[in-house]
């Protein structure tokens, strides 16, 4: 790894795949040694009509995953978008008109057809009863059947569809965090990247719920609009508002230099630390699934890998055809290819539960993100000569 790469990435970011791997091991071990601990923590929840809706420990972890990302965003940069309409338009089309649907198609092909027999055609998963619904035992909802587990109504769904749902949630979450690192490493236009981070954060407030509700419904795991609205409110809007106002207050009282050099430096490991703690809890639930079928990670990773590479190629080739300069082409392709896995994990946990296959699928996205994106960065650097320079 080059010195420039090491300088741009913190120790947490540089070895994220290693930390995730360690969390898998710790979580599985924890599930063996103290099987009731993760269940107890997840049971500390806000309930509606007797059903747990928001796990308090997980909500706290996920807030601290999101807040450090949101507080970095300067939304004043959005006004500069008009100066780079072509790359901004390209990125928006890829993120919201192409990427969600290619993810749906690729994940369905592999998880629902090619790998279905390996996953287990008859294997099932237990997910949360959708918020706002009160169905009787034995009733069907989408592809699920209402069952009673430890006195709580849950939906029993095909396991592959649960993994499929997690892939959908990843596919509709454009990256607004690590993409700043990828753009820097690829020697892209930092200003364009910042503008797109701000625009995508705002777009997610509306489009993430709309596209998520539509695609999950088509995938026969429908989620009521109330549940999606609550998820977006807790995991996107709340940290976004907190980040916006705290940024203004801190800069107003301490100055922008102190904010960037001191405050953000302290926050750097917070997001990934909260993410890793969440992963330990998640794998303490899913340890048995992985131990009994270790290839589960591979079945999920394959469509995610193909999707990431496909979207990168689409964005990069389209930028070439539009005659964009390399400094705009590289981040445009990177933003579409990478995923906002923090939001995806948060939403999967909120909608389907920490122990669900959907939550596990979003974590696989974390596992492959860093090495895959570094590979794409190297491709960009080696192909700079394909683009016009200006």
Image (cartoon, rainbow, N blue to C red):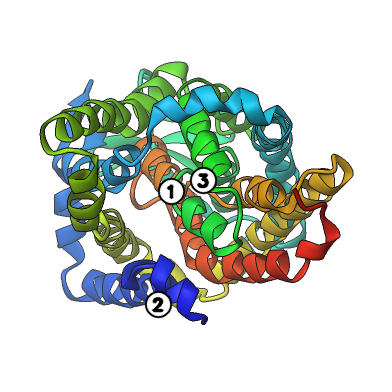
Q: Is residue 295 left or right of residue 20?
A: right
What's the CA distance linking mark 1 and mark 2? 19 Å
Pointer 1 with pointer 3, Cβ within 8 A: yes
Q: For mark 2, what is the residue?
A: 18
**Mark 1 or mark 2: which is in front?**
1
Q: Residues within 10 Å of mark 3 (few under 14, many from 20)?
A: many
| Front residue of 240 and 378 | 378
**Residue 357 placed where, x, y %?**
47, 53
Q: Earlier in the sequence, mark 2 or mark 3?
A: 2
Q: SS for tag 2?
A: helix
Name the mark on residue 175: 3
The residue at which mark 1 appears reads as 177
Q: In the rendered view, would you say 48 is above or below 108?
A: above
In the image, residue 379 above or below residue 73: below
Q: Quadrant of residue 313?
A: bottom right
Q: CA distance from mark 2 to mark 3?
A: 21 Å
Q: Residue furthest left?
A: 253
The mark nearer the N terminus, 1 or 2, is 2
Location of residue 29 with respect to 275 vertically, above or below? below
Q: At 61% across and 54% down in the image, what residue appears? A: 188
The residue at 76%/63% (across/down) is 384
Counting from the top left corner in percent of width and height, residue 4 is at: 48, 73
Tell me what residue is drawn at x 34 percent, y 64 percent. 283
State the CA–CA distance, disc 1 to disc 3.
6 Å
Q: Position of residue 137 (x, y in %)?
A: 40, 28
């Amino acid at each position: 790894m080059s010195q420039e790469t090491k300088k741009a990435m913190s120790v947490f970011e540089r070895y994220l795949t290693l930390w995730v791997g360690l969390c898998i091991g710790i979580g599985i071990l924890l599930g063996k040694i103290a099987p009731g601990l993760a269940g107890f923590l997840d049971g500390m929840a806000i309930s509606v009509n007797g059903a747990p809706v928001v796990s308090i420990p997980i909500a706290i972890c996920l807030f601290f995953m999101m807040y450090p990302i949101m507080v970095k965003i300067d939304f004043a940069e959005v006004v500069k978008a008009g100066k780079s309409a072509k790359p901004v338009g390209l990125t928006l089309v890829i993120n919201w008109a192409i990427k969600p649907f290619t993810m749906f198609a690729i994940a369905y092909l592999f998880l629902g057809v090619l790998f279905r027999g390996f996953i287990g055609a008859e294997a099932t998963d237990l997910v949360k009863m959708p918020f706002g619904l009160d169905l009787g035992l034995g009733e069907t909802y989408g592809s699920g059947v209402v069952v009673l587990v430890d006195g709580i109504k849950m939906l029993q769904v095909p396991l592959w569809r649960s993994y499929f749902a997690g892939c959908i949630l990843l596919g509709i979450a454009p990256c607004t965090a690590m993409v700043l690192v990828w753009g820097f490493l690829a020697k892209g236009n930092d200003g364009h990247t910042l503008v797109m981070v701000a625009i995508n954060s705002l777009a997610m407030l509306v489009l993430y719920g709309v596209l998520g509700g539509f695609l999950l419904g088509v995938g026969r795991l429908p989620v009521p609009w109330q549940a999606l609205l609550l998820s977006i409110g807790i995991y996107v809007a709340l940290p976004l508002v907190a980040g916006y106002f705290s940024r203004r207050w801190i800069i107003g009282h301490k100055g922008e230099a102190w904010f960037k050099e001191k405050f953000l430096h302290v926050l750097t490991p917070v997001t990934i630390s909260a993410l890793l703690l969440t992963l330990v809890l998640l794998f303490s639930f899913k340890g048995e699934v992985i131990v009994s079928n270790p290839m589960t990670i591979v079945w999920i990773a394959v469509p995610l890998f193909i999707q990431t590479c496909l979207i990168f190629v689409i964005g990069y080739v389209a930028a070439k055809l539009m005659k964009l300069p390399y400094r705009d082409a590289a981040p445009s392709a990177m933003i579409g290819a990478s995923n906002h896995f923090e939001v995806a994990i948060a939403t999967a946990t909120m909608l389907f539960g920490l122990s669900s296959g959907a939550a596990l699928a979003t974590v696989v996205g974390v596992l492959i993100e860093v090495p895959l994106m570094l590979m794409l960065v190297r491709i960009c650097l080696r192909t700079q000569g394909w683009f016009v320079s200006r």
